[in-house]
Image (tube, rainbow, N blue to C red):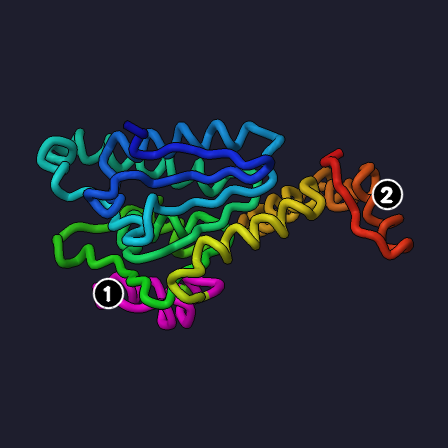
Amino acid sequence: MANAVYAEHNNDIATVVLNRPDKLNAMDGESWLLLNEVMTDLNENNDIRCVVVRGVNSKAFSAGSDISAWKEQRTTPEDVRKYSEDMENTLDTVFACPHPVIAAINGVCMGGGLLIASTCDLRICGESTRFGVPINRLGMTVSYAELGALSRIITPSAALEILIEGSVFGAEHARHLGLINKVVPDTDVEQAAYKLAQQISERAPLVNRWHKKFIHRLMDPTPLTEEEIEEGHAAFETEDYQTGYQAFLNKKKATFKGR
């Protein structure tokens, strides 16, 4: 039987599959640790050019945390802290992935599932996808670290709307809030995600990693160092730059080697 989270590889595109279909891919303690482990391996693999995260089927990306497991996993204060730390560490690992990461979202995307999607770089969903973080119905909070995933991609007002209203909402409203980049027919979600992944993988991989690094760094208000500023010009010293430049002049498609 496949793990609750596992990775597949197709050349330079990796897929991370959330695989608890009987629970709508809701995450328990083990699942968070597995996702961290899978993403750590991908983060260290320089042969990867793009990652797609999806649910094992079209019914759900992830319904969030598996509440039925909380009796065993989130009972004592120590349990709660351990679960939250594991979850936060995993969200940080997904966000820290140097490769572009696409969330292919179908069906249900709630709570912790929405936080996973929020740590990805691009999010594509189906027209009937449902979103929400109705955690105030449970009388509990989302931690500062967990909220970081959400607040990086939407405004404080939008985040408060999601959290204080505690509503479940559809794809178009998710796009209006800034949670989603593209809405497609339900049957086209995976096709759209992999088409985009293929497009990304054909571009200069070092440039994609640099741009992601630069955007993440600009979220930190600390002034840039001279070394960081200089790194903004490093692409011009790569073989890929010469390849892309010459291909443009010759009106040919460039084949980048990542060096």
Image coordinates for residue 70, horizontal then vertical, percent:
13, 38
Q: Is residue 119 above or below residue 17?
A: below
Locate residue 227: give its quadrant. top right
**Mark 1 Cα shell of 10 Å, populated few (<14), some (14-19), many (≥20):** some
Drawn side of residue 121 relative to residue 148, left or right: right
Residue 168 is marked as 1
Choose between 198 and 83: the one closer to the eye: 198
| Span highlighted in magenta in the image | 156-182
Residue indicated by mark 2: 242
The residue sitting at 29% across, 33% down in the picture is 4
* Alpha carbon separation for disc pair 1 and 2: 49 Å
Residue 157, can we see it?
no
Q: Tag 2 or tag 1, which sits nearer the N-term?
A: 1
Q: Is residue 98 above or below residue 107?
A: above
* Residue 35 painted magenta: no
Image coordinates for residue 50, horizontal then vertical, percent:
56, 43
Element at label 1: loop
The residue sitting at 84% across, 43% down in the picture is 243
